[in-house]
Image (cartoon, grey):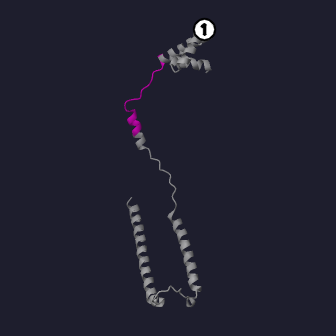
């Protein structure tokens, strides 16, 4: 399609601005070639209007389309998930490494030469830090560790039960 035809089609369809409309009207009044092309395009437009009917969809078209859409399988959103076993493996590796280093430090340490710093307290530190106090401290820490482990296991069991219900 030439630029001339495009301008005339816009003129015929009423899609041009007032300035363009005035220019095309002036060209049609003067130029015989523009007049001939304009008459041809008007004839084509009349033939198209006579033979082409605008089809309207049936009344149930929207309902039928919506029913088909409902029957389609909904796409699953892509989610990047990290496998929990990998996280636990990395955490276990670092835990075992730290425990190994701590165990090696305790195994090679000489506790006989440890001297506590003088804090300037009126009571002696030896009376405050005795084997009974250390055992009590370790016992309380062991109990707290068991409580923490119990809550962790309970949470994991609840998650497993929820997955089983779905």
* 33 w.r.t. 80: above or below: above
The residue tagged 1 is 30
- Is 41 covered by the magenta stretch? no
* 102 w.r.t. 62: above or below: below
Locate the N terminus and report the quarter of the image it occupies.
Answer: top right
In screen coordinates, is 2 left or right of 147? right
Locate the C terminus and report the quarter of the image it occupies.
Answer: bottom left
* Residue at figure coordinates x 61%, y 20% from the top left: 3
In front of the other: 127 or 156: 127
Q: Is residue 40 visible?
A: no
Residue 28 location, quadrant: top right
Residues rendered magenta in the picture: 50-66
In front of the other: 125 or 79: 125
Q: Is residue 97 visible?
A: yes
Q: Position of residue 104 (x, y in %)?
A: 58, 82
Say few, some or many: other residues with alpha carbon within 10 Å of mark 1 (under 14 / 14 to 19 / 20 or more).
Answer: few
* Residue at figure coordinates x 53%, y 69% from the top left: 91
* Residue at figure coordinates x 37%, y 60% from the top left: 165
* Residue at figure coordinates x 53%, y 20% from the top left: 17
Q: Position of residue 6 (x, y in %)?
A: 58, 20
Mark count: 1
Q: Secondary structure at mark 1?
A: helix
Residue 26 location, quadrant: top right
Q: Position of residue 134 (x, y in %)?
A: 46, 86
- Is 57 covered by the magenta stretch? yes
């Amino acid at each position: 399609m030439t630029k001339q035809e495009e301008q005339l089609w816009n003129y015929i369809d009423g899609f041009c601005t007032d300035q363009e409309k005035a220019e095309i009207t002036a060209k049609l009044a003067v130029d015989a070639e523009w007049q001939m092309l304009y008459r041809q395009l008007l004839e084509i437009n009349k033939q198209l209007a006579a033979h082409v009917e605008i089809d309207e969809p049936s009344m149930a078209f929207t309902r039928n389309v919506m029913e088909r859409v409902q029957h389609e399988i909904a796409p699953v959103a892509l989610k990047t998930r990290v496998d929990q076993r990998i996280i636990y493996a990395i955490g276990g590796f670092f835990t075992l490494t730290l425990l190994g280093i701590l165990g090696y430090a305790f195994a090679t340490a000489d506790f006989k030469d440890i001297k506590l710093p003088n804090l300037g307290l009126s009571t002696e530190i030896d009376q405050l830090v005795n084997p009974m106090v250390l055992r009590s401290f370790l016992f309380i820490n062991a109990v707290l560790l068991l409580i923490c482990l119990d809550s962790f296991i309970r949470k994991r069991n609840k998650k497993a039960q929820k997955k089983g219900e779905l």
